[in-house]
Image (cartoon, rainbow, N blue to C red):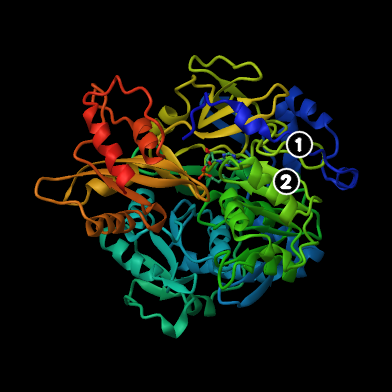
Amino acid sequence: MTDPNQPIEALLAEKRVFPPSRDFHEQAIVRDVAIYAKANKDPEAFWAEAAQSLDWFQKWDKVLDWKPPQARWFVGGKINVSHNCLDRHVATWRRNKAAIIWEGEPGEERVLTYADLYREVNKFANVLKRLGVKKGDRVTIYMPMVPELPIALLACARIGAPHSVVFGGFSAESLRDRINDAQSKIVITADGSYRRGQIVPLKRNVDAALQGCPCVESVILLRRLGETASIHVQAGRDHWWHRLMADAPSYCQPEVMDSEDPLFVLYTSGTTAKPKGILHTTAGYLLGASLTHKWVFDVKEEDVFWCTADIGWVTGHSYIVYGPLANGTTGLMYEGSPDWPEKDRWWALIEKYRVNILYTAPTAIRAFMRWGEKYPNSHDLSSLRLLGSVGEPINPEAWMWYHEAIGKGRCPIVDTWWQTETGMILISPLPGITTTKPGSATFPLPGINADVVDEAARSVPLGGGGYLVLKSPWPAMARTIYGDQDRYVEVYWKRFGKNVYFAGDGCKRDEEGYFWLLGRVDDVMNVAGHRISTMEVESALVDHPEVAEAAVIGKKDEIKGEAIAAFVTLKEGSTASPDKMNELRQHVVKKIGPIARPDNIYFAAELPKTRSGKIMRRLLRDIAEGRALGDTTTLADPAVVAVLRGQYEEG
Ligand code: WT7
């Protein structure tokens, strides 16, 4: 969380600007700045024209039905996402084009052409049907980064069953809550996955989760580890993927979906302990993902595109699966970590597969920066022609390093701002047109009406900062929080009125209108590009029998952006110790998953509170970051702070 009133000068210290080179401009897909004016003049006509790029069973009657805050796009249209990602490509020369080039962490290689992917998806769609999955049924997917993961997503889309992918770094308990919230009938998983040479026991987590999920009838189990995995297979419930596929029919008619039928649910953290199931629908989402993929990354027919995200996050949904496949792109998919077995793994992959476009996160860039240039320099990166960044604000130093050490000064950088809820990139350069400034996501894309407002919802003039909002609907916007429409309206469409989407980010604009994203303005942390709610971690901590109270903050971290720091008071009779600290950290891992493990736990006799009883997080952040204390006059008992502070300085 960043103070939206922080001085922008710090960000603007880097004065260099980067216009697109003449060569890049001339070959770019989007070359004409008039596109912004055209989209602004008549957004509906603009989106309708863009939607011609999709293959419709039946065209829409109405482009947009906007009853704030509810939008329906391409009303009356009939379409299927899997048909758009596969059938229309296999009907052309792209049939034998590589759709997914995959490399496993231990070094296996697989290439699936569009025809291969089509065959597998059709068969798997039939497998799902045979297990009783019908249009509208939810399917939870908890899998490693292997080709069967996009196959599972596309098979769900083919039969109209919304998927809910749960990232493999979540615990059994998190998985259980997400399965129950979505009321999934089926869970798709694997015997395990690899992470830095270690095994992640996915199936064991599923078994534990399913102790508390009466809605689940069947589990489909992919063999990833093979003989080495000691797993339990429950007769009648668990089915091996390969057995089910062996006799599955090779064609499955794609379901005719309404534009507004649900495509998927994806859980993300909010300001309460309960994650939100963000619901995306069919046509608008597919249009948003595919159009931005093509325009922002300037993807050409012959390009190899690599998005390094995990499909468990929205970035993977939109820019590994749906966007690239709808565009008939060749994508690289990698299972493992950047530093396994060596810190040059990514650069070796770029050289090996001649990757042209790389899309990754600032946290990874900062880690590479620390490891030094010898790793990228030991590989031929000359195939790269465009670099992307996503997930958190990219600091100008990391931007410059990315530009020079990886892009060798040749490759435009697109810093792309968006969210799980937006479905598609909303603020980003168009690389053939936009002059970039290191650290700025530059401008809203054509057709996107973003603004920066103050507390009273008044637009802040250029040069000032406030809250980022969106003042018009866009096709890939979330439609609701699954099962909780009231919360959807409350969280996003209330603070500045029911016509205005509140993103939860602070933002400044400079005198030239460039957008500078400043981070979350709510109690959501961004840890290595992962969104984690302070409340979620707090409730995991107080779930421990010895914890009386907990307050969690994100503290600045050079690599991760933010690191999790927790302040804990123990119950009578319990004593603080290094062992207790490890036990509590482990407890959070058990409740949420390794991604939420606190870096620091500070034990305190009391937490600093205002007279009305609100925990003073700003103060805790100051303490954790070792800063001078700000105004503490609203504190009920200022002595508490001194105690906390003293402890911080000792430890
Ligand atoms: C939050 C959304 C969809 C991207 C993956 C994360 C932060 C994302 C940027 C950026 C500054 C960014 C925001 C946003 N964020 N991209 N380019 N510059 N901040 O998706 O988990 O839904 O998180 O990530 O704070 O609200 P997410």
192 is higher (above) or lower (below) than 165: below
Left or right of residue 510: residue 418: left
Tag of residue 103: none
**Residue 452 placed where, x, y %?**
59, 23
Q: Earlier in the sequence, mark 2 or mark 1?
A: 1
Left or right of residue 574: residue 143: right
Q: Residue at x 67, y 33 (%)?
A: 13
Q: Amino acid at mark 1?
A: Arg
Asked whether residue 82 is in view, the answer is yes
Question: Which residue has dot 2 on it?
Answer: 413
Left or right of residue 468: residue 577: left
Foreground disc of the pair 2, 1: 1
Cβ of mark 1 under 8 Å from ligand 1: the answer is no
Q: Residue at x 27, y 43 (%)?
A: 647
Dividing the picture into quarters, in which one does residue 325 lie? bottom right
566 is higher (above) or lower (below) than 347: above
**Alpha-carbon neighbours of circle 1 within 10 Å: few (<14), some, or many (≥20)?**
few
Spatial distance from mark 2 to mark 1, Cα to Cα? 14 Å
**Residue 531 placed where, x, y %?**
46, 45
Rendered-image quarter of ligand 1: top right
Q: Secondary structure at mark 2?
A: strand
User: Which residue occupies the foreground of this view, 259 or 456?
Assistant: 456
Tag of residue 16: 1
**Residue 594 placed where, x, y %?**
39, 58
